[in-house]
Amino acid sequence: MIKPSNFSGILYGLAISALILPLASFAQVETIAVSAEPIPNNPATTQSKKVVARIWHGTVLTSKADEYYAYLVESGIKKIESIPGNLGAQVLRRTNGNNTEFTVISYWESRDAIRKFAGNDIEKVHPLPRDNEYLIKPETKVKHFDVMLDDRK
């Protein structure tokens, strides 16, 4: 039950709401568009030069993953990083039960720089000498992507 002293307060609140709510529909609301495109001339979010990412993937038995990683770095990554036109590399690792996947991303100044290392068919895998000892179903192709945005901190 509503007390008479509260009733006038409720009526006053309803009257104010009835006046204000229709006015809110005329309010200006600014919409901000969010884009995945880099902001031009913003050094924090744009590439200062074109970079090509070369991505290779391989799977080994988990029991051999640590041994393969050491071999991969010593025989593959260090070699790649010494090639003119190479801008560095990353090695990603994911273990799923008995299998461990490796993804190598090497960064290059251009596809021409990759050709100097890989030959004209830049998508052809260039296996390491002992890859057959480790890899399960070795892949025959690598992929290349233009790096559009790299804003790692």
Image (cartoon, rainbow, N blue to C red):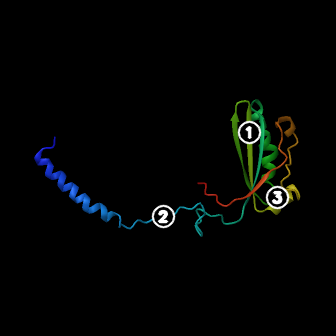
In-front residue for pair 133/67: 133
User: Which residue is labeled 1 in the image?
Assistant: 101
Identify the residue at horizontal 83%, vertical 53% (top origin). Answer: 123
Of the 4 image quadrants, the one containing the N terminus is: top left
Compute the Cα span from label 2 to label 3. Answer: 41 Å
How far across and down, in percent of the image, does residue 130 sit?
Answer: 87, 39
Q: Nearer the viewer, mark 3 or mark 1?
A: 1
Secondary structure of residue under mark 1: strand
Q: Amino acid at mark 3?
A: Ile
Q: Earlier in the sequence, mark 2 or mark 3?
A: 2
Q: Quadrant of residue 91?
A: top right
Q: Nearer the viewer, mark 1 or mark 2?
A: 2
Q: Amino acid at mark 1?
A: Glu
How far across and down, in percent of the image, does residue 103 sit?
Answer: 74, 45
Q: From this viewpoint, which residue is outermost toward the bottom? A: 41
User: Which residue is labeled 3 in the image?
Assistant: 114
Q: Earlier in the sequence, mark 1 or mark 2?
A: 2
Q: Residues within 10 Å of mark 3 (few under 14, many from 20)?
A: many
Q: Which mark is residue 32?
A: 2
Tell me: 60 left or right of 153. Answer: right
Q: Is residue 104 above or below residue 15?
A: above
Compute the Cα span from label 3 to label 1. Answer: 24 Å
Q: Which mark is residue 40?
A: none
